[in-house]
Image (spheres, grey):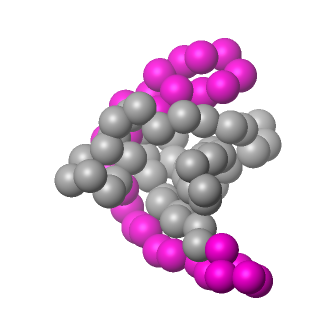
Amino acid sequence: MGEQSVRILARRHRVFPAKIRTEGDGSVLKIDAVERCWTEVGQGGTTKFVYRVRSGSRRFFLRESGGQAVMVPV
């Protein structure tokens, strides 16, 4: 499984993703924990927020930039 577009449905403390919906099959995942988060700044000053999250036994990265988010397996 590669990179997959997702939509963040809910946030914890107005920052951390708490629930997401995958664009492919529409499944909803509850985020049990945000294990790590950081900010990446690209050329032209674009900001990307990256979260390493856990949902059940699955771990993956969520990358969010400009209102778009993608999920990438660890």
| Magenta stretch encompasses residue 34 | yes
Judged left or right of residue 26, residue 54 is left
Judged left or right of residue 22, residue 28 is left
| Magenta stretch encompasses residue 61 | no
As rendered, which of 12 and 58 lies closer to the eye? 12
As rendered, which of 43 and 54 lies closer to the eye? 43
Judged left or right of residue 54, residue 39 is right
Range of magenta residues: 20-46
The C terminus lies in quadrant: bottom right
Residue 45, horizontal then vertical, whole percent: 65, 82
User: Quarter-wise, where is residue 64 in the image?
Assistant: bottom right
Residue at horizontal 74 percent and vertical 82 percent from the top: 44
Residue 66, horizontal then vertical, whole percent: 61, 56
The correct choice, above or below, for 48 with respect to 23 in the image is below
The correct choice, above or below, for 45 with respect to 4 in the image is below
Query: Which residue lies most toward the left here?
Result: 13
Residue 3, horizontal then vertical, whole percent: 75, 45
Residue at horizontal 47 percent and vertical 74 percent from the top: 38
Residue at horizontal 66 percent and vertical 16 percent from the top: 25
Whether residue 63 is visible here, answered yes or no, is: no
